[in-house]
Amino acid sequence: MNLIDTVRLSRAGGTGGSIGTSGGTPGVAASALPFAFAAPEAVNAAMDIVFIENFRGQTIIGIDEDELHTRQPVTMNLAIGVPSLRACQTDRIEDTVNYAAVREALHALLDTHRVKLLEALAESVAQLLICGFGAHWVRVQLAKPARFDDVDAVGVMIERRRDAGIGSRAHGHASGYMSGYASLGAGLVPQN
């Protein structure tokens, strides 16, 4: 459990409450669960979550001279929330988020993006999932696993949710582009 999860758990008072529970286990906050299984706090409706864990790819990303021209490994963990997947009843791939198609789109994005920061790339991934795959909520964890010798990985984790203007228009052209997002750290700063 990381620092943010610890704060969430302590603020929740050790109960599921509005944060959510998993598997009918009372007293287990969603933030205490593994990455892909924690319920989306930013969305009030129940979500089904399709996840991709430990996706690996290669891309040019970074601001240091040694990163600007050489592909380096990145890893991603994705949680893609959608309201009640019809595939649970129909058993049809057309009624769910096709993770094989997501995987292909991620490789294409890694080959074509032109951003320098992991934060900007994570945002591009989130918008790809919202606009291209119909996600209502996403959590994107993006890391450089081999950047430094003395740490396993460095990276960023973001959460985004769809609003009325996002997902219905082409990526990057929605009005109110930033207005519908939920921040991973939202609500963590005490109010005076």
Image (cartoon, rainbow, N blue to C red):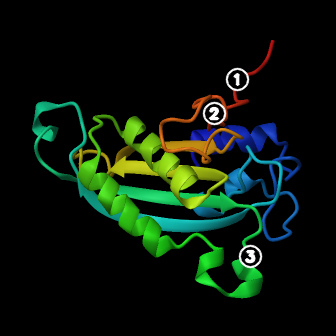
Residue sitting nearer the eye, 94 or 36: 94
Query: CA separation, marks 2 and 3?
Result: 31 Å
Q: Which residue is mark 2?
A: 185
Q: Amino acid at mark 2?
A: Gly
Quarter occupied by residue 48: bottom right
Check disc 1: other Cα within 10 Å, few if <14, some if 14-19, many if 20+: few
User: CB under 8 Å between callouts 2 and 1?
Assistant: yes
Of the two numbered discs 3 and 1 in the rendering, the one whose residue sits closer to the viewer: 3
User: CB under 8 Å between callouts 3 and 1?
Assistant: no
* Residue 173 rendering spot, x and y as whole percentages: 50, 35
Question: Mark number for residue 86?
Answer: 3
Element type where label 1 sits in the image: loop
Quarter occupied by residue 64: top left
* Residue 110 rendering spot, x and y as whole percentages: 29, 53
Q: Which residue is mark 1?
A: 189
Q: Is residue 112 left or right of residue 93?
A: left
Q: Is residue 75 left or right of residue 89?
A: left
